[in-house]
Amino acid sequence: MDRVDDAWLDRFPELAALEPAPRRRLAAAARPVTLPAGATVFHDGDACSNYLLVLDGSVRVQKVSSSGREITLYRVGDGQTCILTTTCLLAGQRYPAEGVTETEVRAVVIGNPLFQTLVAESAAFRQFVFAVYARRISDLIVLVEEVAFGRMDLRLAARLRDSADPDGVIVATHQELAAELGTAREVVSRLLKDLEHRGLVALHRGRIELRDRHAIDQLAATV
């Protein structure tokens, strides 16, 4: 693979304070990668040997149970990194979940040896790694609270509100919504049928139409 210059570092504002020597090492060692949509970036149980920094695109990180149920943990988008990767590199552990590209993804990769060296020797790089880690942990705590304590009908309404296009259409299957909410497809289907019976939505194959956006907004506001 071709090497890249250090222009990509501008996509990560926290790295602006990176010392000159670490910056040169990153520029020299970084490898560009391009992944198509639907590619598996890592599997549950894989060893971790690289640190991935996403330039463009989206990677969905999800956990799949033995019964096939899915929950989306978070997404890694433009100018972001994956905290599971950080955890696995720092702890020498294997991935406890899987990452799948939702769009074409352009990223740069640095190997574990350089990652460990920079964490140990560069205060700016270390601050970047742990600042991103802390933000993501906060997001995961919110997810746990929602799954554990949130009413599923209200969470579903909030997901519909946030996912709808300007015409009030959500392009998603019941299974995809269930994965986002951390519940079973049957639960989502039952709740959507109830919303349809109340005249709030219309269900179609692969998409949902908001019929009463105001009512959906009111439900979502109570989450």
Image (cartoon, helix red, strand yellow):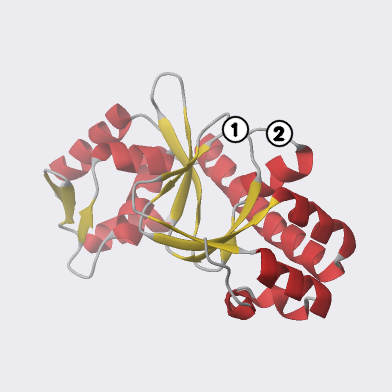
Q: Tell me: 222 left or right of 85.
A: left
Q: Tell me: 100 left or right of 129.
A: left
Q: Name the quadrant containing residue 186.
A: top left
Residue at image position (67%, 64%) is: 29
Above or below, 30 relative to 172: below
Q: Name the residue under label 2.
A: 93
Residue at the front extreme of this rendering: 1
Task: Identify the mark at residue 96; answer none if there is no mark.
Answer: 1
Q: Where's residue 169, x and y in %?
A: 19, 59
Q: Name the quadrant containing residue 220.
A: bottom left
Residue 223 in view of the camera: no
Disc 2 marks a residue whose amino acid type is Gln
Residue 140 in view of the camera: yes
Q: Tell me: 134 left or right of 75.
A: right
Residue at the right extreme of this rendering: 121
Numbered disc 1: secondary structure = loop
Residue at image position (75%, 69%) is: 25
Residue at image position (58%, 33%) is: 46
Task: Identify the mark at residue 88; answer none if there is no mark.
Answer: none
**Distance of mark 2 from mark 1, alpha carbons?**
9 Å
